[in-house]
Image: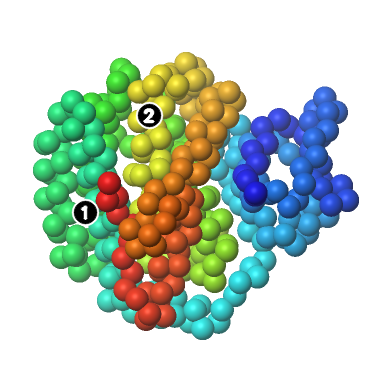
């Protein structure tokens, strides 16, 4: 069974026959069979060579890089093997046609905001008074399909997020003053954790896209641009409330993560190694959990749900079936 590998210690990663060899700063070596690798996360300073890059490309292994502050710096995205000129034309057609583009973008925000609402409903039913936030978000959700442009739609999305983030001080049982979402750079422990976990979800979507014929640079909600896989951002919106936010709430409320997990004199910008390792372990565990899928009639993992979302979008683009984004039903 393939899995994600996270490498934290600084060192050298190279090809050794038909395996990957990691050698840390102390000279200790670890061998990883290539057949077991789904994707690699480099969480420290690593020396690589072209022989390794060619080997990873041969097996279609995405490699994601993070710096000392657990800040995502980029991905090695191998040459695509699953290519379709017909689908590429369809992707571009739906982007150029403003009506078709807006239709898809609305569905992304509809699903994301619905999953946000369900998060609030979940905690409201467990003794947290979140009714005010739920009502405000529900009111804004009704305006999503009235949007006449991407910018107007993003405005509604931004307002929904602002209301949602204000509720976090109630949901999270720790005394961390979280006033608003701050990204570059994060200004407290909650913002730092949001940035880190959201990025992990983004990379999971990117790896799922690689296994399909979709071009990850052509998007509908986020504007396509240089140096980013913007379709990953689009699809990640659907799953961030379900995977990232629920993980963050659990980590804080179980005291698995506290402000002590961060470097205080760096304004909580730096997440310590042990905490980071625990977070990715919890995330991988959650991604492997299964639910009974209503349409498929069988149990599927959260990880598979992400890939399924990509295939649902393909069916929409080739006019086979209207895109119905994933929404929590339990």
Residue furthest to the right in view is 17
Q: Gap between marks 1 and 2, in whole Å?
A: 27 Å
Return the x and y of residue 262 as percentages of the image width and height: 49, 21
Q: Quadrant of residue 81?
A: bottom right
Name the image colouring.
Answer: rainbow
Pick the front one: 32 or 317? 32
Q: Position of residue 46 (x, y in %)?
A: 73, 39
> Upstream in the sequence, badge 1 or badge 2?
1
- Tell me the residue that label 2 is attached to: 250
Question: Where in the figure is residue 316, as x and y percent of width and height?
Answer: 37, 74
Apparent side of residue 20 relative to residue 190 in the rendered image (left or right):
right
Disc 2 packing (10 Å; few <14; some 14–19; many ≥20): some
Residue 45 visible in this rendered orientation of the protein: yes
Say which mark, if any, is on residue 156.
1
Disc ID at residue 278: none
300 sits to left or right of 121 = right
Q: Look at the numbered disc 2 and give the secondary structure of its residue.
A: helix
Is residue 22 shown above or below 115?
A: above
Determine contact: label 1, label 2, CB under 8 Å.
no
- Which residue: 36% across, 38% down? 245
Comparing labels 1 and 2, the label whose residue is closer to the camera:
2
Residue drawn at point x = 29 percent, y = 50 percent: 328
Is residue 4 or residue 77 the one in the foreground?
4
């Amino acid at each position: 069974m393939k899995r994600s590998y996270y490498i934290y210690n600084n060192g050298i990663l190279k090809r050794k026959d038909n395996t990957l060899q990691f050698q840390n700063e102390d000279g200790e070596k670890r061998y990883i069979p290539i057949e077991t690798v789904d994707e690699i996360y480099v969480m420290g300073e690593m020396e690589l060579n072209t022989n390794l890059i060619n080997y990873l490309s041969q097996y279609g292994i995405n490699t994601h890089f993070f710096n000392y502050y657990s800040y995502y710096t980029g991905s090695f995205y191998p040459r695509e093997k699953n290519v379709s000129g017909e689908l590429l034309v369809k992707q571009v057609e739906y982007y150029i046609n403003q009506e078709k583009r807006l239709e898809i973008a609305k569905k992304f925000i509809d699903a994301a905001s619905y999953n946000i609402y369900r998060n609030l409903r979940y905690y409201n039913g467990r003794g947290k008074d979140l009714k005010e936030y739920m009502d405000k978000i529900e009111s804004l959700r009704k305006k999503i399909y009235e949007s006449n442009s991407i910018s107007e739609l993003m405005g509604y999305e931004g307002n929904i997020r602002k209301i949602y983030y204000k509720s976090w001080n109630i949901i999270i049982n720790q005394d961390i003053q979280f006033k608003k979402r701050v990204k570059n750079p994060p200004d407290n422990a909650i913002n730092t954790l949001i940035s880190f976990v959201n990025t992990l979800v983004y990379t999971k979507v990117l790896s799922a896209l690689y296994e399909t014929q979709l071009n990850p640079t052509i998007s509908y909600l986020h504007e396509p641009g240089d140096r980013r896989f913007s379709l990953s951002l689009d699809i990640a919106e659907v799953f961030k409330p379900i995977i990232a936010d629920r993980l963050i709430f659990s980590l804080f409320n179980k005291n698995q993560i506290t402000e002590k997990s961060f470097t205080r004199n760096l304004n909580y910008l730096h997440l310590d190694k042990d905490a980071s390792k625990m977070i990715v372990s919890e995330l991988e565990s959650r991604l492997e959990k299964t639910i009974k899928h209503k349409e498929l009639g069988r149990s599927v993992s959260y990880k598979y749900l992400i890939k399924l979302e990509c295939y649902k979008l393909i069916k929409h683009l080739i006019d086979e079936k209207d895109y119905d984004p994933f929404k929590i039903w339990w």
